[in-house]
Amino acid sequence: MPTETPTLTKRDFQSDQEVRWCPGCGDYAILSAVQAVLPELGIPREKFVVVSGIGCSSRFPYYMNTYGFHSIHGRAPAIATGLKLTRPDLEVWIATGDGDAMSIGGNHLIHVLRRNVGVKILMFNNRIYGLTKGQYSPTSEVGKRTKSTPYGSIDTPFNPLALALGAGATFVARTVDVFQAHQKDVLRRAAVHKGSAFVEIYQNCNIFNDKAFVYMTDKERRDDNTLLLEHGKPLVFGRDGRRGIRLNGTRLEVIELAEGDNGEKDCLIWDEKAPDQIPAFLMSQMLPPDLPTPIGVLRETDQPVYDTKVVEQIEHEIETQGAGQLEKLVYSGELWRVGEDGAVTRGLEP
């Protein structure tokens, strides 16, 4: 008989493991937000699985009182894909970092997004390799001095949001670890999205890359450096909302809002559901110091979900051809036996 889903709380998603990140790490804030949002979804706790790779963020499954995999470096999307295909009824979340996802795991990441597998990907971006003690990462800025780049990085960093959009992601968003209310709103949106949801979370590493995002988190500066994306509303930011974003040809530019000329009517109206990726891609290219950093949902679109289509395909073939037999499959195709005398027998029978 069907039973009602019990009312869950944040405490229900807290495991009995001691949380062991560096004091002050932004991962604590992300963990708290996830543990607060999941019980709101009305889904039984045993339906959640958290999959991670290697890195500071990858300790996440230990601290979630759900099922979980602490897998190998960069392979969380592949393992999560396999799990979602075999158990499409599960809510599969991936916890990964900028190194785990953008470097060794880059190939797996783009394909889970391309396929639109129904998993939720939280990419903690602190622009550093924290677990291995402070080497530069694929998202570190040019000129970054670290233990592995003592004279400054000369690599052009990845833009995670642009990468996700280029791979065809159907849900792309960004938030910040200390913006708790905003982070929870983004997580709720990601949770209910049908298909892959990619959320970049700016996260401070106070040991090896402290204040990487201070221009956004400092109370005196954040209003002028952060652009909140709200669907259907003009792109306005700054103290007292006196600045805006205008599309000038194919380029975005900051304008000072005033009565008459350059009012809110001149600002770009945000459309997260645009039929193409152009508005979202333009947002992904907004970088300091010339432009504010956008946070919120860049793109959400409905596309066929990979795991749903695979299940439908399997069910259709079973309906039309009948259930398969493993033994018959093993003995099908090009098979032969090589005897002790070297003689080859073809076309084996079960």
Image (tube, helix red, strand yellow):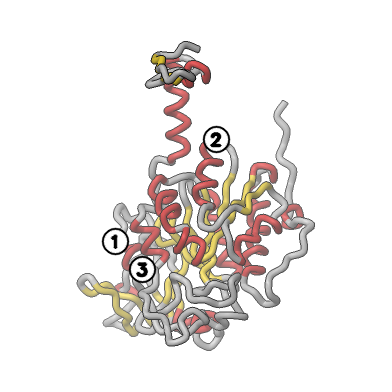
Q: Which mark is residue 205?
A: none
How far from the left and from the top, in percent, is residue 35? 67, 58
Spatial CA span between label 1 and label 3: 9 Å
The residue depicted at 31 percent of the width and 82 percent of the height is: 255
Q: Amino acid at mark 2?
A: Thr
The disc at residue 86 is: 2
Q: Secondary structure at mark 3?
A: helix
Residue located beneath label 3 in the image:
283
Disc 2 on helix, strand or loop? helix
Q: Dot 1: within a 10 Å radius of its alpha carbon, few (fewer than 14), some, or many (20 or more) residues?
A: few
Left or right: 332 as drawn, with respect to 122: left
Residue 10 lies, in percent from the top left, at 72, 57
Q: Secondary structure at mark 1?
A: helix
The single residue placed furthest to the right in the displayed view is 16
C-alpha distance separating marks 3 and 2:
36 Å
The structure residue drawn at horizontal position 71% and vertical position 58%, both measured from the top left corner, is 63
Mark nearer the viewer, 2 or 1: 2
Q: Are marks 3 and 2 in contact (CB under 8 Å)?
A: no
